[in-house]
Image (spheres, helix red, strand yellow):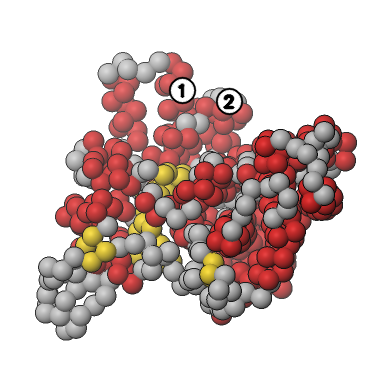
Amino acid sequence: MSFLTQRKRAFVASISNLAYCNPFLPERIEHERAALGDEFIESGADWNVHAKLGDDHPNVQKLARDSDALATELADKLARGAAGGDADRRLYEDLALFVLYHRFRADFEALIQRGEASRAESSRVSFFDRYQQDADRLLRVRGMRPIDEAELAHLFACFYQIRRAFHHIFGNIIGVSAPAARFRAAVWQSIFTHDMRRYRRVLYDRMADFTTLITGPSGTGKELAARAIGLSRYVPFDPDRRAFTEDVAGSFHAVNLSSLSPTLIESELFGHRRGSFTGAIADHVGRLEVCPPLGTVFLDEIGDLDPAIQLKLLRVLQQRAFQRVGDTKDRLFHGKIIAATNRDLAEQTRTGRFREDFYYRLCSDMIRTPALYEQLRDSPKELGHLVLFIARRLVGRDAEALAAEVERFIRQSLDQDYAWPGNVRELEQCVRNVLIRKEYRPPRREPDRGSDQLADAIRSASLSVDELICRYCTLVYARTGSFLETARRIGLDRRTVKSRIDAKLLDALRRQGATTTSYRPAPRRS
């Protein structure tokens, strides 16, 4: 007879699925519901869209307690020689790993916070001895597969990485809308892939081989996503020193390519030798050389990169080799590259403005950041949440009063459907303006070719009636920033206009600057 009864096997199978799923996807809720049954608490269960809950939700706490009690019971049975097949033993191992993670979750979180404050992650980790003792009792029991010291250290490093990823994703990629939740899930997948079992087995030390390309409108958090990925890389643990082998706090190197000339970009990335160009009065070490093996170089605005430098970076991605400007010695890059752009690189490759071979090296892993209008369309309460988050960074304990003032101004002075073409970055400027001047005036933008492109499509008779309505609604909305004003202008119901907006076309129009050109603030309401 197996050490797992049918009821306990079903519970442990749910825990096994839960341990390896993406915590920011709806599947997590289903696994929790399956494990808890009638004791599952619906309220706030989708903590991914609740700013203050996180993995301290009562469901998570109960699962951790129940799993801990069951793992202790089953470990005693196995130690006494209880029978069981290979499948049940694999399930028990997953249960034990789930328990170990939750037992030391708070310790890992404290370690992360100490590292952020003092970059002390490579110092001795005092709770490893307690972890090793618990792992011995739960994993090194009779009848289970042998686990050596190296694997125990690897599991410890995986737990630390999982906690670090959760900390950076949930703490820094804010938002309570479904698009924001999907964004967090996508970042988690960029770190661990869709299969965490395979990641733990063979991919944990190979993710630098996969370049991540982050696309989306300006002001939507592309650097936040890059930082979350870069600061959540796997760091080995040395059990002899009782320390992690590297600090991760200073391993993220961001370079805004659009702010530098081609010569300065080369020097910043690859370094240069003294005398290699005018002004090169000393040797300079570039970001690729400074970056440690477990570090990350973030290349923002990659779409603006000169083709000659694209070719040099292509060599870095293909061969991991580069040379300083003015030097002939090959140097190796061991870190990870993350790139970001608000441009349509696929379109730029078709027009010859971006190298096709470089593009396909960049896009082995792609993430798209959601525009603010997408988040607000899904959840209007997102605006208040974001305003409060920004206010806390600006004024600390007076945040709630400032947030209330900003929301009141937005309700009274901006159209309720204002599109926020500058996304969260524009919203932050709105908060700052209201803080200083008690008002915010959105910038005017020059018209672009959007109407000409629609006219060309009409002249070529290439649009269906439905496509024509969608494109026209999108163009007018891009110009007004208001569903209500768009509906008034074209004579359709506001809800019809909202359902006809083409998100991809709207993003393209925004990149081209064809947004809110005729915006006028709504009159104040008494």
Pick the quarter of the image with the N terminus: top right
Q: Is residue 219 left or right of residue 241?
A: left
- Contact (Cβ within 8 Å) of mark 2 with mark 1: no
Report x, y in % for residue 212: 40, 50
Q: Residue at x 50, y 59 (%)?
A: 234
Nearest the eye: 305 or 143: 143
* Whole-number angstrom distance, CA of label 2 to CA of label 1: 10 Å
Query: Disc 2 residue type?
Result: Thr
Numbered circles on residues, count: 2
Q: Judge the density around disc 2: few (<14), some (14-19), many (≥20) Cα neighbours within 10 Å.
A: few
Q: Which mark is residue 323?
A: none
Q: Residue at x 27, y 57 (%)?
A: 320
Q: Is residue 293 left or right of residue 319?
A: right
Q: Is residue 200 left or right of residue 47?
A: left
Report x, y in % for residue 436: 58, 71
Q: Is residue 142 left or right of residue 420?
A: right
Q: Tell me if residue 282 comes above or below residue 384 in the rendering.
A: below
**What residue sits right under mark 1 in the picture?**
469
**What residue sits right under mark 2 in the picture?**
496
Report x, y in % for residue 457: 31, 23
Query: Disc 1 residue type?
Result: Ile
* Precedes in sequence: disc 2 or disc 1: 1
Nearest the eye: 66 or 385: 66
Report x, y in % for residue 370: 51, 45
Whether residue 97 appears in this view of the structure is: yes
